[in-house]
C-alpha cells in the first residue's frame, strides 16, 4: 500500500469512527433504558429488610437537548416494579438556561418513589 493511500484510508477510518461515536451518543445511548433485577445478598441485614427491593436511577439529564417525555415514560415503567427503596444517583439536569426549572417541574411529579424511602444525591451536572 502506498503512503498516500494509507494516509487517506486512515483519515477516512478516523472520520467514520468519529461519526459513529457521535451517532451512538446522540441516538442510541440516551434511549437506552435498562431495568435489571439482581439478587444482592447482604450479611447481617436486619430481618425486616430481607426481601425488600432497591431501585437505583441515575443520569436523568433533563435538558434542552433531549425529549424528556421519554424520561416520564421510563419512570412510569419503573413505577410498575413497585420498589421499596429508590436511590437517585445524580445528574438530574444538564443545565443550560432557566428552562430546565420548568422542565424539571414537568418531569419530577412522575419520578419513581419507594414505598419505604426515596433518597438522592447530586451529580457533577447538578449545580
Image: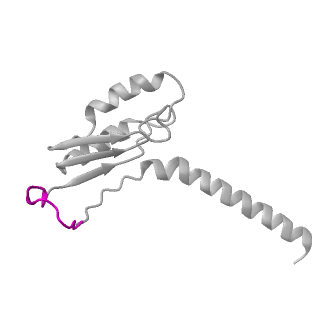
**Which residue lies at the image location 46% right of the left edge and 35% below the top edge?**
126
Specify whether 94 is left or right of 54: right
Provide residue 72's location: percent of width, then percent of height.
32, 38
Specify whether 93 is left or right of 7: left
Provide residue 107's location: percent of width, then percent of height.
33, 32
Residue 14 drawn above or below residue 125: below
Provide residue 114's location: percent of width, then percent of height.
19, 44
Residue 107 drawn above or below residue 81: above
Is 61 colored magenta in this rendering? no
Region of the chain picked out in magenta, as a range: 40-51
- Residue 116 or residue 12, whichever sits in front: 116
- Residue 47 or residue 82, whichever sits in front: 47
Q: Main secondary structure of the magenta part?
A: loop
Marks counted in the figure total 0
Specify whether 67 is left or right of 4: left
Residue 106 drawn above or below residue 59: above
Quadrant of residue 102 within the rendered picture: top left
**Which residue lies at the image location 13% right of the left edge and 56% below the top edge?**
49
Amino acid at each position: 500500500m502506498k503512503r498516500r493511500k494509507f494516509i487517506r484510508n486512515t483519515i477516512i477510518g478516523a472520520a467514520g469512527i468519529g461519526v459513529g461515536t457521535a451517532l451512538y451518543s446522540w441516538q442510541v445511548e440516551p434511549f437506552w433504558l435498562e431495568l435489571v433485577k439482581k439478587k444482592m445478598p447482604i450479611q447481617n441485614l436486619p430481618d425486616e429488610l430481607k426481601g425488600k427491593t432497591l431501585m437505583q436511577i441515575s443520569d436523568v439529564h433533563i435538558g434542552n437537548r433531549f425529549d424528556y417525555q421519554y424520561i416520564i415514560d421510563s419512570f412510569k415503567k419503573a413505577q410498575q416494579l413497585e420498589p421499596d427503596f429508590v436511590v437517585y444517583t445524580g445528574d438530574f439536569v444538564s443545565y443550560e438556561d432557566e428552562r430546565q426549572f420548568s422542565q424539571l417541574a414537568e418531569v419530577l411529579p412522575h419520578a419513581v418513589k419507594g414505598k419505604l424511602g426515596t433518597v438522592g444525591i447530586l451529580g457533577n451536572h447538578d449545580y
